[in-house]
Amino acid sequence: MKIAFLGTGRLGNGFVRRLLDLGHTLHVWNRSPAAAKALEAHGAQAFASAAEAIAGVARVHLALADDDSVDAVLEPLAGVLPAPTWIIDHTTTAPTPTGERARAWASRGKTYLHAPVFMGPANAAEGTGIMLLCGDPQACRVVLADLETMTGKVMEMGSDPARAATFKLLGNLSLLGMTALAGDIVRLATAAGFEPAEAVAMFQIFNPGAMFPARAARVASGPFEPASFTTSMARKDVRLMIEEAARGGVELTVMPAVAKRYDEALATGEANLDCAAPFRWPLGGAGAATD
């Protein structure tokens, strides 16, 4: 299959090399031409413009930075992209504009599918990791087998064109949130006189990630009574963390916000609810304290 790939940064580079290994013909374009030109050594053909790159291809894949960059690249192509040429966008974008973009292209009689990924450059080159896919069900069925060759697993997310974008952000929120928490862990360890590497070695044995699905499910829908660990006791532990860090001249970055939420919950009578309760949404939802 002849494919255009627009955006050959680290992720796009990996995808292009994977597609070449699978026997496809690749037209490539990148805003910084050198990144596309480098792929000619692997068998791709680089073009000076996106419009030139899409000429004669069956599909256009994108791996760009954000919504603005996707629109900046795609909109000038609206008048020259043939209807049979489908767009498959791997860019991490916001749900609302992604849905609007899919509907705009559909109104032009053209197919736009969103397929963001939980993949790094190495995954893209090796065909491992996870790809999300949403959009027109018939179109998704047509491309599914081809996308499965680009990744380890394709998660079909349904027809809502914003759904894959939403779940990609949810996934990245968990990853970036864990990264921020790791920052507080190494700060507290340093304040207490331990090397960060020594502190995080504990997680080779104690794996809090294994508990995450159950904790997340409780935040999402309870139950908050009986509590496995009360809000009042959780707040006490957060206080200990913040105070010990301060003794070592260190300020935590995440836990003060956690403390604030617990304080708000305690002020509304939630001391004996499970420590997950203060983080439910909406705050007055199931499990709220009553008189």
Image (cartoon, rainbow, N blue to C red):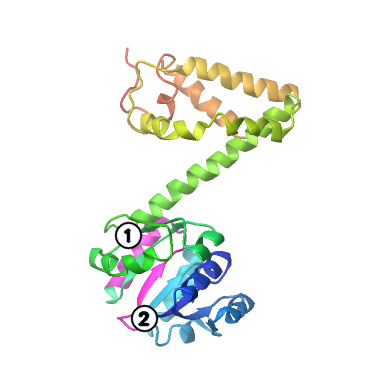
Asked whether residue 101 appears in the rendered view, the answer is: no
Closer to the chain start, of discs 1 and 2, is 2
Instruction: Select label 1 or label 2 by which is in front.
Output: 2
Residue 111 in the image: state x and y as whole percent. Answer: 31, 72
Asked whether residue 229 appears in the rendered view, the answer is: yes
Is residue 230 inside the magenta stretch?
no
Q: Residue at x 53, y 32 (%)?
A: 207
Dot 1 corresponds to which residue? 134
Dot 2 corresponds to which residue? 58
Type of the residue with mark 2: Ala
Q: Say which mark, if any, is on residue 174.
A: none
Which residue extends farthest left? Answer: 138
156 is higher (above) or lower (below) than 40? above
Type of the residue with mark 1: Cys
- Give the distance between the C-alpha atoms of the residues marked 1 and 2, in whole angstroms: 19 Å
Over which residues does the magenta segment extend?
81-106
Horizontal placement of 124 versus 106: left or right?
A: right
